[in-house]
Image (cartoon, helix red, strand yellow):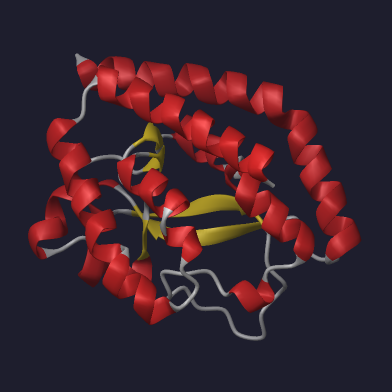
Amino acid sequence: MYLFFKRLFDITCSLIGIIITVPLWLIAMIGIKCSDPGPYFYLAHRVGKNNKEFRMFKVRSMRLPKGTNENYFKADTDRIFPFGSFLRATKMDELPQLLNILRGDMSLVGPRPASVDQVQIVRTGKNAAAASATPGLTGPSALYDYIYGDMIEAEEEYRIKVLPTRLELDVWYVKNRNARLDIKMIWWTIICITAELFHK
């Protein structure tokens, strides 16, 4: 019953969210055009429920690389253009994932999607339980990463100090998920992003 209403909630909220945020999509596109001409969006290779691959939609916040790979847990900060930093801080770069939620690739709340290159690290062994749930736009691990992970730029330091807790939170969410927890995660996400905007 919970999963049925969760899916219904996802469809309703993603449809409303897409309609309401259309002006933000336009602002993002104009900002990208002025800051770093090129594609407005890109498709990231991600792994979702039952380790099934899908394409995750994102607004582009980094300069086009000479060679793309998704082996890293941290974004290449040297490639993030100024307006891209704003997109990432406000999470506007994540808005296209509402399309993934509508399609059923993702949910509003859940473990973060895994990069194809990272599956052996984040979706096996003690972390395998995270693969049993639909990945989310937000959730405990996403919030932890937003609050603490973004403060660390070095990839190796991130792997040591942030990644283990992030993975534990993904598994914890799957084992404890319920409607009340989902609502709390959405509420705290709004609070964190709002606080970041005022801070900046």
**Can residue 100 be seen in the rendering of this structure?**
yes
Task: Tell me, yes or no, if residue 45 can be seen here.
Answer: no
- In the rendered structure, the answer to whether residue 96 lies left or right of residue 168 reads right
Of residues 186 and 69, the one drawn nearer to the viewer in this rendering:
186
In the rendered image, the vertical position of residue 82 relative to residue 55, given as above or below: below
Q: Position of residue 195 (x, y in %)?
A: 58, 36
Q: Quadrant of the N terminus?
A: top left
Residue occupying the point 74% across, 30% down: 22
Where does residue 107 sit, x and y in percent of width and height? 39, 34
Query: In which quarter of the view is residue 20 placed?
Result: top right
Query: In screen coordinates, is 40 left or right of 4?
Result: right
Q: Depth check: give the residue in front, 181 or 62.
A: 181
Asked if residue 114 is positioned above or below residue 76 in the image, the reply reads above
Could you tell me which residue is drawn at 77 percent across and 63 percent down? 82
* Coordinates of residue 72 in the picture (x, y in percent): 43, 75
Examine the rendered structure and indicate whether residue 48 appears above or below residue 162. Answer: above
Q: Nearer the viewer, residue 193 or 79?
A: 193
